[in-house]
Amino acid sequence: MGNFSQLVYLVPLFPLIGFLINGLFWKRMPKSMGGIIGCVAILASFIISLGIFFEVKNPAFQVEPKVLFDFIKSGDFYIPFAFQVDALSSLFLLIITGIGFLIHVYSTSYMHHDEGMVKYFAYLNLFVFFMLLLVLGANYVVMFIGWEGVGLCSYLLIGFWFKNRDYTNAGKKAFIMNRIGDLGFLVGMLLIIFNFHTLSYHEFFDKLHNSQTIVPTSTYNWIAICLFIGAMGKSAQVPLYTWLPDAMAGPTPVSALIHAATMVTAGIYMIVRSNALYDLAPMALDLVATIGLITALLAATIALYQNDIKKVLAYSTVSQLGFMFLALGVGAYTTGVFHVMTHAFFKALLFLGAGSVIHAMGGEQDITRMGGLRKKLPVTYFTFLIGVLAISGFPFTSGFVSKDEILMAVYEHNKLYFYLAAFAAVLTAIYMFRLFMLVFMGGFRGTQEQEHHLHESPSAITIPLIILAVLSLVGGFVQLPHLFGGHDYLNEFLAGAKIPAYVHEDASTAMKEMTLFGGTVLGLLIIFIATRKLFAVKQFDGNYTGFRKVLANKWYVDELYDAVFVRPIEALSNFLDKFAEKKGIDGVVNGVGKTVKWGGDRLRLLQSGQVGFYIFIMVLGIVVLFTLSFFWIK
């Protein structure tokens, strides 16, 4: 077994090199070369990540920070630029580089006709570099560098087609809403420094165990809530979720990268990494669970009546992230990570499948103009169906196992939360089967020209789809319940990173069987409803009335934010610009200049050049000086 953990610095270094090469020479480099460099960089990182994963699996592996260089040193306060290689970081490395590589390969075909393809791969490599920094950091500072970096790259990638004003606005929206959350993260870091004088995970968690009698519980809660605010922005939780559906403005592979395996899971990673803190902060955990549940329900209702294929998947991501936070909020950290992993498989599959459909439709994303694509796109159809089954929790797919485990954990924690979460899970199945039926079933609703050009995507697109479809089917076996002859492989693996496994107190066989039976019945019922009654595939025109219109318009949350925050701030900005800036600050600065100029113009008149006038002024000065000396000098 090679000593791969000593080479961990190469994992983020390869994407950084790929970014530098493509970024510096993108105008002169051939498109195919840019794609090869981008893919090879991520593949090299994946190979080393695989070696690290198998090394970490060894029970004899010692977890200790790998210090690259001194970063911040001030008196007793010391922050090294260090990486932490353990079970949690190695698992995320595999997800990021593995799914990332498939998305890079997919992009070589999807973006082939784009003139900025090499620049696109440069951005993509930079995004992966920052995401790897985020999960590898041995302290919150390195995590924060990666955290801010993925925010920057998301702005560049979402607004990649910047000539479209709506796309640039979507990029700005993502950037600004993430800054709101990042402020919370920053305040949380400052509170940790103030109370514990360190930002290193190892030192901080050790001090947590030794300071329970010294530091009040409210301090833990405030630190945990501030960190969670950061997670709410990055992982798109209520109320900071509206940026994520708008992020669909970017190319489809970008949507897959941001929504499946990387950026949106950063908040989950941060809370799981900080589990020692959250275990001491019950109020913060309750908040995490409540926000997660609200997000899961709200996003699921919105997804029911969206007409844009990528928007449905975007709200689906928001909803699934809500499930993950719900799991973390009830203390099931390993379950949350499990759902991150399975979600990475099936959500990447669904987004890339949607990209294949959009590619075949010549850029069309409106599902009102699709239908009957199963005959023309057989590989996309079959793999997309597997993704839909997985996210819907169909028995023995990866999504079934992870979602079932979340529901079990929630059932033991809070019965009301369980029933609401189960309802959100049913909604997931309904809107995903609706999407599937409207895209692939019935008759074609597009134009004759679109129908004429329909064709299956090239192998660079279909091969990643097939690989992800297989992973979506078998990914759940790492944590298959004992009832079905499985084993808690993931729990045992993550125990090496000091992440406690959630022990089901009431996980009776009857409950498991009921969940399995219920999942099967619901799945069949949903297929029947979606095909026959609820959505009327053949007559679908995309127009909604009544309450459906409210859901189609996303509960008017964007309009509410616009009225409550955007417009008042714009009005205040215009007022300050007009009065405080132009008439106040500019008025004072320009007034000083005008006064000096006016005074200079008047004083200049004294220099007339006439000798008689100069003698008169001199005599007048002597008289003034004489008068002053007579009255004031004693």
Image: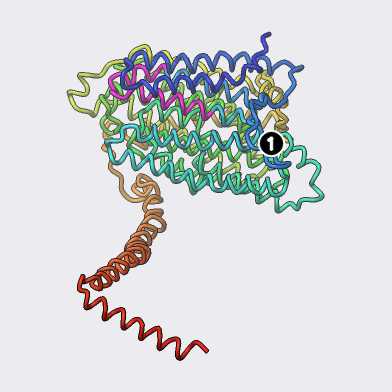
Task: Name the residue nearer the viewer: 395 or 384.
Answer: 384
Q: Considering the numbered disc 1 on the image, is that residue within a helix, a strand or a loop? A: loop
Residue 181 seen in this snapshot: yes
Residue shown at 60% from the left, 41% from the top: 418
Question: Residue 380's spot in the image, x, y percent?
Answer: 37, 18
Q: Which residue lies at the image location 25% right of the left edge and 19% below the top edge? A: 454
Give the image location of residue 206, x and y in percent.
77, 37
Q: Quadrant of residue 171?
A: top left
| Closer-to-camera residue (335/535) | 335
For this view, does 381 lie left or right of residue 283? left
Amino acid tagged 1:
Ser
Residue that carries the numbered disc 1 in the rendered image = 200
For the magenta stretch, what is the residue range? 105-131
Q: Position of residue 241 (x, y in %)?
A: 46, 44
Viewer-nearest residue: 624 or 73: 624
Taking 628 as reference, is 319 above or below it? Answer: above
Give the residue furthest to the bottom.
631
